[in-house]
Structure formats: structure tokens, C-alpha cells
Image: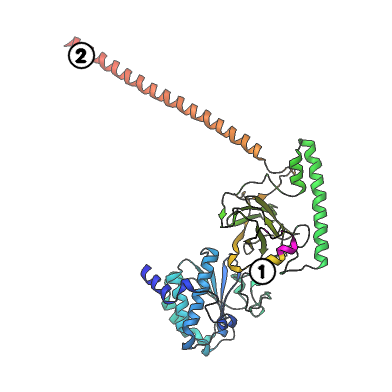
Amino acid sequence: MIDESFQWRKEYTVNDLTESVLPKWLFESGALFLHGYDKEGYKLFWFRVKHHIRDPKQQLEKKKLVAFWLEHYAKRDHGKPLTVVFDMAETGISHIDLDFVRFIVNCFTDYYPNFLTKIVIFEMPWIMNAAFKIVKGWLGPDAISMLKFTNKSDVQEYINGEYLPPHMGGTDTFKYSYPPLVDDDFQTPLCENGPITSEDEHESKEDIDADTKETGELNEEQNLNQKKMNSIEQISKSEETDKTEFKPKNAKKALTTFKGPLLHISPAEELYFGSKETGEKKCLIVLTNVTKNTVAFKVRTTAPEKYRVKPSNSSCEPGTSLDIIVSLHGGFAASLQDRFLIMAAEMDQSSGAGVPELTQFWKEVPRTKVMEHRLRCHVVESSKPSSLTLKENSFNIPAKTNEDLHIQLTRLLQINKRLQEQIDRCLWFQQLSAVLSLLSVSVVAFCFYLVYTQRS
């Protein structure tokens, strides 16, 4: 199997497949692309069958396009599973291409075996029933169970309407176009104190006013919390500054870190948000610059209407760390489909770090020099996550500081020491009891021996 896989990669030059190598018309056709997520949070790999016409002369290039997308996704998302969607609306006999379908099936069964979660087939024409009986013969029992035949009335059992086009009964306004390459529709979110001006997004005045109002409310609430805290304990100036700036230095540190060539990013893979019941609406991302130059970064998301990010477009000095606060806006709740993209690039020493300089920098920087890392959202129902989650308790008291954690750790070590001493004492008594028992048996045996010898 390994030899066959290497041979396949050599035949289709998988390692050398890039956007510039493949013909432009392949991408412009819109027959294959990645976009959206299913209900379980898996990426959707779309095959718009009506845009595929069987042509033996173009078959090799089309197969390379499939290999390009799978390899592109494998490198970008580290082999996370995906869901294949065969959109067969408005298709007929001219679109039947069993050789191409078999190639796609073999890609998942032989060369990317852990990628496939299910195959959603939408509105398959009755005339293709015979063809799909042949396809089932190529699949094993496990793969056959992944086939989900759907229509407009039941496709939302697997995919939410927000990622379905109108002809499938959804509300997704996405329209495929090329260039650029479709990339999860990442957009620039709002900063917590107003929109970040960029080439990607300009928010309306109404959104800015609403966000400013929300910030004012947050400041009022923060002042109230400050007064309550003063009645409980005296707070140092550094803690007051942190609270005023919404920079939670006392947040729980992440257990995982993504170590990139420019930035170390914590957490490595997931941002933990609470459900509406738990009320956890803020998360912390820590960026650490591991280079000798200033690194510019920006944060983008698939759901810009839900989240506020501060800062979302800035720079990080050499050898320093920077906190990014991600907070849910209004009454929105996080979902498994939400994604964040962190883009970073090294700046020249002569470059400025202001907003105009950063905007110009991102327009000019080559894509090959941009580091990208993706984070997904995780919704915590009840238990506390082991990541950077910001949550206040029922008395509006912030999370435990490092000093409190140190005290708790010291207490645990003391308790552990006492338990160890008790265990040692128990073992000593156990050994003493064994020696006494052995001595008693020896004495009894000696007594029996004396009685026996006297009688004889």
C-alpha cells in the first residue's frame, strides 16, 4: 500500500502541485472547491457535478485538481476529516463520468484514508441509479455506510442552512469565483473599541456606534466590579491597569502551543467558549515573537458578525508576547463551524507599525512569506476547559492569580507529604506485625518441640 501511494503521488506529481502549475480554467470552472462546514464542524469538499463534462483529453488535469485540493487541505489543516458533497442538481447523462468518480473514491479509500466522514449526495437523478450501484461496488462496507442520499427536504440533517446555497434550501449567499483561491471566507473582525480599517472590510457607521455603545456598557460594568473588589481586598495598580485595559494577565495558561517560524501561538488548536448557560464569552490568544525582527499580524474569522477581536491588526516586537482578546458580541453564541485565521509576516526594521504602514505592508508582502495558522472553536457545556478562557465567578471576582495558584500548589504538596508519611507509618506497622507474627509462630513451635521431647 505504501509503495502504491508513493507511485500515485509520483504519477500525479502531488508534491509539486501548486496553483500556478494547474490550468487557470480548472479553477474558474467551479466544479471542485472547499467551502463551509457540516453540523459536526467538518470542512465541506464540494463537487458541483453540473460543471463537470466528461472529456478524456482533460481527465488527467481534472484528477490533478482533486489531488491538489486534498493535498492543499492536508497541509493547511493537518489532515482533519472532511465531508464530500456531490451536488447533482441539474445533471444528466452527459455529466456521468464513472472513471472520475472512481478516482475520487480511491483517493479517500487508499491515499487519504482518514479524511472522509461522509458523502452527501444531493438530488441524484433517477437515471444515475444504475451508475451508483457500480460505485457502491468499489466501496467497502464502512464506506457504503457513509453515503447519505438527500434532497431539499432532508439535506439540513447533515449541513446547516447557513452553508447551503438557495437551490438546496439554504441561505448561503456565497458564489464561487476565481481568483483568488477560496479560503474559508475569512474576514476581518471588529476591534472591541471599533472597526479595524483594512483592505478587506469597512463597517458602516451604525455598526461602529453600536460597538462603541457596547464598549461603554462594558466600561461601566468594569467600574462596578472594581468597587465590589475594593470591598473584598486591596488590588494593586498593575491589576487595576490590566482590568481597565481588558488584558487578563491572570488568565489560565494554555497547555498547548503552536510553534511557528515567526510566532508561537497559544492555544495551539482550539478556542474554548461556554454555552449560553455557562456564559463564558471571552478567550485569550497569546502570540510570542520568536524572531529578531518585528512581526506584523492580523486575525480573521469566518463569522465577523459574532466576534470582537482586540487587537485584530497590529505588530509584535522581537522576543515579546502579546495578548489578543476574542469576545462574543451581543447575544451570539460560538459554534463548531467558526474558525479563526492568524496571519503573520516579518517586517523590515525600517517599516513603521502604524495603521497606514500595516495596511500598505499587507498589500505588498508576498504570500509565500506569510505564516498562517488556523484555530477552531470549541463549545464547553459544563466542565472547565484547559485553555485560555476568561470567566468571572458569581461574585464578579477575577480568576485566581498566579500567587493563589502557587499557594494552592504548596498546600497540595503538603497534603501529599502528609499522606506519604502516613503510608510510610502503615508500612512500618505492617512490617512490625509480620515480624511479631513470625516470632510468635517460632515461640509456639519451640514450645511444642519442648513438650514433645519431654514426653519422649
Report the residue marked by disc 2.
452
The CA distance from mark 2 to mark 1 is 107 Å
Left or right placement of residue 204 versus residue 109 in this view:
right
Q: Nearer the viewer, residue 424 or 77?
A: 77
Q: Which residues are magenta?
A: 348-358
**In which quadrant will I find the C terminus?**
top left
Report the residue marked by disc 1.
364
Residue 105: x percent and y percent?
Answer: 46, 75
Q: Compared to 57, does 181 lie above or below?
A: above
The residue tagged with tag 1: helix, strand or loop?
helix
Residue furthest to the left in view is 456
Q: Nearer the viewer, residue 273 or 445?
A: 273
Identified by mark 2, the residue type is Tyr
The answer to whether marks 2 and 1 mark residues whose Cβ atoms lie closer than 8 Å is no
**In which quadrant will I find the N terminus?**
bottom left
**Predominant secondary structure, magenta span:** loop
Query: Around disc 1, counting alpha carbons within 10 Å, would you say few (fewer than 14), some (14 to 19), or many (20 or more)?
Result: few
Left or right placement of residue 417 versus residue 207 in this view:
left
Q: Is residue 357 magenta?
A: yes
Residue 209: x percent and y percent?
Answer: 83, 62
Residue 413: x percent and y percent?
Answer: 55, 33
> Which is more N-terminal, label 1 or label 2?
1
Q: Is residue 366 magenta?
A: no
Task: Tell me which residue sits at (74%, 45%) in the image.
Answer: 242
Q: Nearer the viewer, residue 73 or 173?
A: 73
The residue tagged with tag 2: helix, strand or loop?
helix
Task: Tell me which residue sits at (82%, 53%) in the image.
Answer: 217
Can residue 13 be seen? Answer: yes
Query: Around disc 2, counting alpha carbons within 10 Å, would you say few (fewer than 14), some (14 to 19), or many (20 or more)?
Result: few
Can residue 144 be seen? Answer: no
